[in-house]
Amino acid sequence: MRSLAFNVIFIIFVNLLYGQQKTSLNGIWDFKVDGELKYNIDDIDFSINSRKINVPSCWEAEFKDLLDYSGVCWYRRVFRLPESWKGKRILLRFDAVDYFTEIWINKKFTGNHEGGYTPFCFEIQDKVKFDKENEIIVKVTDPYKKDKRFPEFPFEEIPHGKQSWYSPSGGIWQDVYLEAKNENYFTILHITPDIDNKKVIVKVELKYTPVIKNKMFIIVNIAPEKFSVEKSYFSSVNVHKDKKSYFLEVSIPDFHYWDIDAPFLYRATARLIENNREIDRISDTFGMRKIEIKNGRIYLNNHALYLMGALDQDYYPGTRYRAPSEEFIKDQFLKGKYMGLNFLRTHIKIPQPEYIYQADRTGLLLWIDLPNWDILTDKAKERAKKTLKDWIDRDFNHPSIFVWDIINESWGINLRKEDQRKWLSNMYDYVKSMDSTRLVVDNSVCGGNAHVKTDIEDTHYYYSIPDHKELFDKKTEEFANRPDWNFFYEGYERRGTEPLVLSEFGNWGLPSIRKLKKCYGEEPWWFKTGNPQSTKPEGAEKRFYDWGLDNIFGSFDNLSTAFQKTEFEALKYQIEELRKYPDIVGYIITEFTDLNWESNGLMDMCRNTKIFYEDIGKIQAQDLIIPYWKKINFWSGEKLEMVIGLSHFSKLEIKDYSLRWKLIGFSERGLFKKVSVNKYNSTVIGKVKFTVPEVETSQKTKILFELIDNYGNVVSENFQEVRIFPLEYKKVKKEKSIFLDSSLSQLKDALVKNGFKVYDNINDRIDCAVSSSITPQILDYLNRGGRLLLLKSKNIEIKEQLPVKYVSRDV
């Protein structure tokens, strides 16, 4: 082994001197739009009506006139090759192009590729020149929506994800580069960690069947990502003729785990050696970690983990489908972790490699959805299977990825049809056959569809808070008890131990338009999109002032702040409610960031944090203190009683801890001693009781809760806002007269008791009308300058009587 290590180190040293034989083709390319499909390789002329485009990019992000472009665009650039590459195999690599790509080198057809998310390459050594410039021309066809000019690529049958919702993404949107290779080279390096046996299994594949003239072998060395000879581990295997695939076992006796809080990475490098000459090498990073399911819970490295995630649409300001920079990705991930997230669900999009690279290094788990199509035809099935294979081959080694998700909400599949259910079940098995080390979700479920065969039993439901608190509570209780509505198609395979995860829920909180304009340098292009009745941002500021909302909020920024506070209060309540049920082991907030007019993000579209950035991490913790509140508004002198619980999923042994509480700004406080909670459970600790203190004016304060370990350290904290009102507010200082509609008669006694004079008819003596509907009498009263308090729980159209439509918040 010592001799083997020495030889490897010598080979590494020589190749460090020699350098990597790789050159980037990123940069400025010539670009030509072919909207009429009139060009071909023989007559296209880039000296006429062409533009310059930066590669990689989405053409929609580069040119405003191509915002919703469907069709063909051409790319061109020139490059030179070094003399040292003569006699080599020269690979032209594309990390991803959307959607159908055709390539010519020096006007010689090189090849084509279908698919917008995965890498591909061609050997071009027989088409290039070494004494002059080479020309590469790329034709990209990207159909969009109802464009019928491309019957071989109908939009509804190709994987496209949410390009149909937010913005299409066409062109060379990931890296392009050239590589020089010797007579044979690796095509696959897959590393499977086995933490229980302190080893990894390395699979490598060669492009060509080996031609063996001398002894040839493959050697694998594994070391920390920052190379260390002292901590390197090796294994080797002889190469045989007629064999392209090899498996090697490498022991790592004193390894470091890859974990959320300590994302330690190793680098595995495989080398093909003949006579101490390195023919090829392939390298990738990986982590020593294990994902598994036991007893209805998800385990990371043999410890159950409570999943706290957010849905990431993976769209960006300015650059659309591609992140502005790797630093931008890292920054948003660090903000997510600060807010307590331990994973993201990357939504129906295969992200660019840099995204996953940064997730590996920041310790953020990823649940990634396959991009959807719309109709499951035979061709759609072929495309889905091919995309899955290429995607898993590309990302197999990333420790951050823990879930492959095939379908979202039955988009692109009709599960009422038996053959399509069978296809989905087979696809689950197919993914498992490629990667048995991760979890697979068949169909991320929402109301009206269900699972067929899955590792995680997830579902989606949206109820705005506080409007639909009772509905959210009821649905959550049902979900915790494994309802029939999550598996109901004939032939489903339910084990009954699948972990329960609420994989979509959320609430809206408007962003600051001022900050968005600063980010974009102008009003964002998407302000003109959305539903004109409810979600179209264009004109929002004008409507704010036209409707007199400045008299209430002062500025649009203040309105945004108020909405964001409501968003946080709703999320806080929902997360605490979910944590009351120990059988629910995770959730996914919709969403990580706002996306265009969808304002339900934890950050806005530009990754500006919202006002709850500092607080939300307190409720996204493995150990969460839960206030079981029934009301939060109290009169002075009233008895406040609030049950306190604790959800425990951390690695701590919570035994004989203390839980203290205090009312901020007042003397009321207390302590629960001898707090002990079993792991992976949710337990009631006790009940906070006190008499609400006297106040002279209404006050908003918090009850602070802190869990204290046996050494006096605060290991978890939470709070609950409460509002206190002085008793004198119970009665009006001056008698007020009101009209009360008969449908609200249950309010009469309380109103009279608190100093109101109540009339059952509209007259000149009333100060205000209180009603659940608009009657002709009330309309006449309003037209004479009267005031109305309309109490209505359901949608009501009143536009015939008033230029107003009242809509309840159903989501």
Image (cartoon, rainbow, N blue to C red):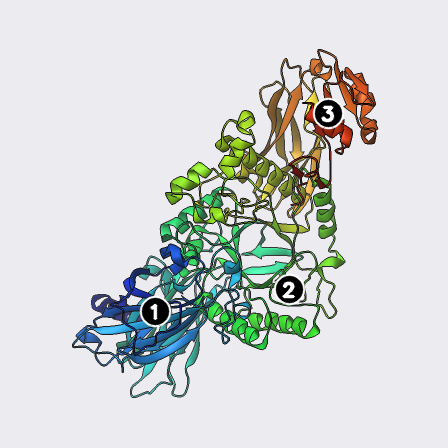
- Quote the CA–CA distance across marks 1 and 3: 67 Å
- Can you say whether 570 is above or below 180 in the image? above
Relative side of 183 to 415, left or right: left
Residue under circle 3? 781
Q: Disc 1 or 2, which lies upstream in sequence?
A: 1
**Amino acid at circle 1:** Trp
Q: Quadrant of the N terminus?
A: bottom left
Instruction: Answer whether residue 194 is visible to the viewer in this image.
Output: yes
Any mark on residue 454, and which?
2
Q: Position of residue 343 (x, y in %)?
A: 52, 52
Q: Disc 3 or 2, which lies upstream in sequence?
A: 2
- Can you say whether 436 is above or below 57 in the image? below
Relative side of 570 to 228, left or right: right
Q: Are marks 1 and 3 in contact (CB under 8 Å)?
A: no
- Quote the CA–CA distance across marks 3 and 2: 60 Å
**Amino acid at circle 3:** Tyr
Relative side of 417 to 139, left or right: right
Q: Residue at x 60, y 41 (%)?
A: 571
- The residue sitting at the left extreme is 131
- Can you say whether 484 is above or below 97 in the image? above
Q: Position of residue 18 (x, y in %)?
A: 21, 69
Pointer 3 local density, CA inside 10 Å: few below 14, some 14–19, many at least 20? some
Residue under circle 1? 74
